[in-house]
Image: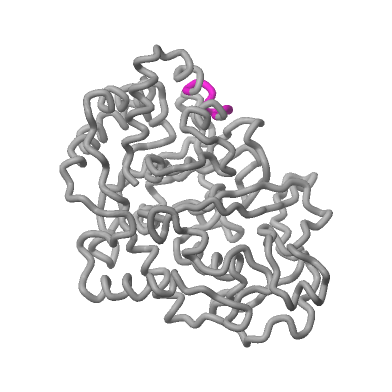
C-alpha cells in the first residue's frame, strides 16, 4: 500500500461511513449553518442565477447560453446539463501554452446575437488558425463548490507529488493561473477562486460584462462591429454579481446515501485498486469568515490536482502547467446523478468512463478490469451511492 493510499484509508473510511447519519439535504439547498443574512443572500442570488438575458439586457454579442441556470439545471439550479462548449489553445514550439486571449480564446462561443450575425454573417465564433488544438467541455454541476473554494492551497500542495518522489506512479501537480496563482476550478484546474470562476462565466458564457471583466472581447481577434452591443459596460453591476456568487458559494453538497453491505464492500475495493490515490475521499476547509464553510470536511473525492490521463483523452493545454493529457481529478460528488461522464461527456456509463482512464490511472484501470464480477459490481454500487 503506498503512502497516499494508506493515509486515505486511515483518515477517511470512518468519516465516510458515519456521514450517512447526517440530516438529509435536497439538491439545490443551501449549506447548513448559514446565518439569516447569508440565507437571504443565497435566496436573492438564486434569482440572479436564474435571470435570462436578452441582447437588450446584455446577452452577447457572443454567448453559449442565456442564463446561468440555462446551462446548470439538471435536477436543480446549479446542476449539470447536456450543454457543451468549445475551447481552443495553441501549444508553441517553446512549450508555452498560448490561451489565444488576443484571438478570442480560450473559449469560442457557439451562438451570436442577431445584430452580430447581420454584421459579420456568422452563426458562431470561429476558431482562429493559430489554434493547435481544440476541445469540448460539458457543463459541470456546482454543488459544494464553495467548500472546494475554502480548501487551503497548502492542502493541495501537500497532496501534490509532481516528481513522483514516492514512486507510486501518481504525480499530481497544481496548475497555475497566468499570474502564477494556484488554480482549482475548471477541468484543467485553471481558475484560482470561485468568484473568478463565476465572474468569468458571465462574460465568457453569456457575453454579460461585469465590473471586473468590463470588456466584451473580440470575435476571434477582430473588434466587435459598431452597434452590435447596445448597453454600456458593465452590463451586470457588482451587487448582483456578488449575489450570484453567494448562491453558488452556499450551494450544499447533498447528503451521501446510506451504504448497504455491497456498497461498503465497494468502498473497500475503491481504496484497494487505487481510485482514492487521486479521487481523495475527503478534504478539509480552512478558517473562513462564513461559519458554514469554516473547518468543514467535504467528501468531494478529488485532490483538485492535475494528473496525466493518457493520450486517448488528450486535447488542449491550459494555464502555466496543464499539458494536453493532464486533467484535474473530477470531484465525484456529482456522480450519482450523472448522465454523461468525463470532461467532454464521451462516456455514457461509469464503467465506460473508467475504461478511458489511462496515463497515471492505467494501473487502477487494469486492476478494475481484473476484478471478479462480484467485486466489480460492488465497486460500481459504491460509486452509484455517492452524494449528489
Q: Is residue 130 above or below residue 202?
A: above
Quadrant containing the N terminus in the rendered view: top left
- Indicate how the structure is coloured in the image: one colour
Q: Is residue 53 left or right of residue 3?
A: right
Residue closest to the eye, 216 or 60: 60
**Magenta span: chief secondary structure:** helix
Q: Is residue 44 left or right of residue 206?
A: left
Q: Position of residue 381 (x, y in %)?
A: 34, 28
For residue 274: magenta?
A: no
Residue, x 35% and y 76% (percent of image)?
44
Q: Is residue 350 above or below residue 88?
A: above
Q: Position of residue 156 (x, y in %)?
A: 42, 46
For residue 361: magenta?
A: yes
Residue, x 46% and y 75% (percent of image)?
241
Residue 28, quarter of picture: bottom left
Q: Position of residue 186 (x, y in %)?
A: 53, 52
Q: Is residue 288 left or right of residue 176?
A: left
Q: Is residue 362 left or right of residue 375?
A: right
Q: Which residues are magenta?
A: 357-364
Q: Position of residue 34 (x, y in %)?
A: 23, 66
> How many marks do you count on the picture?
0
Residue, x 56% and y 43% (percent of image)?
343
Residue, x 34% and y 60% (percent of image)?
251
Residue 106, quarter of picture: bottom right
Amino acid at each position: 500500500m503506498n503512502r497516499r493510499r494508506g493515509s486515505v484509508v486511515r483518515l477517511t473510511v470512518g468519516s465516510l461511513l458515519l456521514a450517512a447519519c447526517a440530516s438529509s439535504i435536497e439538491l439545490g439547498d443551501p449549506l447548513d449553518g448559514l446565518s439569516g443574512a447569508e440565507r437571504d443572500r443565497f435566496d436573492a442570488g438564486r434569482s440572479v442565477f436564474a435571470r435570462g438575458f436578452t441582447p437588450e439586457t446584455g446577452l452577447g454579442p457572443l454567448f453559449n447560453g442565456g442564463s446561468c441556470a440555462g446551462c446548470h439545471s439538471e435536477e436543480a439550479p446549479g446542476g449539470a446539463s447536456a450543454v457543451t462548449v468549445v475551447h481552443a489553445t495553441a501549444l508553441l514550439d517553446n512549450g508555452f501554452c498560448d490561451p489565444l486571449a488576443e484571438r478570442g480564446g480560450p473559449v469560442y462561443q457557439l451562438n451570436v446575437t442577431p445584430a452580430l450575425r447581420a454584421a459579420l454573417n456568422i452563426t458562431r465564433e470561429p476558431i482562429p488558425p493559430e489554434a493547435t488544438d481544440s476541445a469540448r467541455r460539458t457543463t459541470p454541476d456546482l454543488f459544494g463548490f464553495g467548500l472546494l473554494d475554502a480548501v487551503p492551497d497548502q492542502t493541495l500542495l501537500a497532496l501534490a507529488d509532481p516528481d513522483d518522489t514516492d514512486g507510486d506512479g501518481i504525480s499530481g501537480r497544481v496548475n497555475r493561473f497566468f499570474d502564477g496563482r494556484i488554480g482549482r476550478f475548471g477541468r484543467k484546474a485553471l481558475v484560482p477562486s470561485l468568484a473568478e470562476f463565476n465572474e468569468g462565466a458571465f462574460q465568457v458564457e453569456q457575453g454579460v460584462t461585469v465590473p471586473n471583466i468590463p470588456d466584451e472581447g473580440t470575435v476571434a481577434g477582430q473588434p466587435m462591429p459598431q452597434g452590435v452591443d447596445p448597453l454600456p459596460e458593465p452590463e451586470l453591476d457588482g451587487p448582483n454579481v456578488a449575489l450570484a456568487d453567494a448562491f453558488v458559494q452556499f450551494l450544499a453538497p447533498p447528503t451521501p446515501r446510506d451504504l448497504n453491505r455491497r456498497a461498503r464492500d465497494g468502498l473497500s475495493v475503491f481504496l484497494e485498486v487505487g481510485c482514492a490515490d487521486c479521487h481523495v475521499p475527503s478534504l478539509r476547509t480552512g478558517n473562513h469568515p462564513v461559519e458554514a464553510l469554516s473547518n468543514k470536511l467535504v467528501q468531494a473525492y478529488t485532490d483538485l490536482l492535475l494528473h496525466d490521463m493518457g493520450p486517448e483523452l488528450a486535447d488542449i493545454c491550459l494555464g502555466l502547467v496543464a499539458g494536453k493529457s493532464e486533467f484535474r481529478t473530477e470531484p465525484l460528488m456529482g456522480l450519482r446523478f450523472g448522465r454523461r461522464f468525463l470532461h467532454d461527456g464521451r462516456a455514457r456509463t461509469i464503467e465506460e468512463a473508467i475504461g478511458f482512464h489511462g496515463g497515471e490511472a492505467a494501473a487502477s484501470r487494469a486492476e478494475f478490469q481484473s476484478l471478479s464480477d462480484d467485486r466489480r459490481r460492488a465497486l460500481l454500487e459504491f460509486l452509484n451511492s455517492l452524494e449528489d
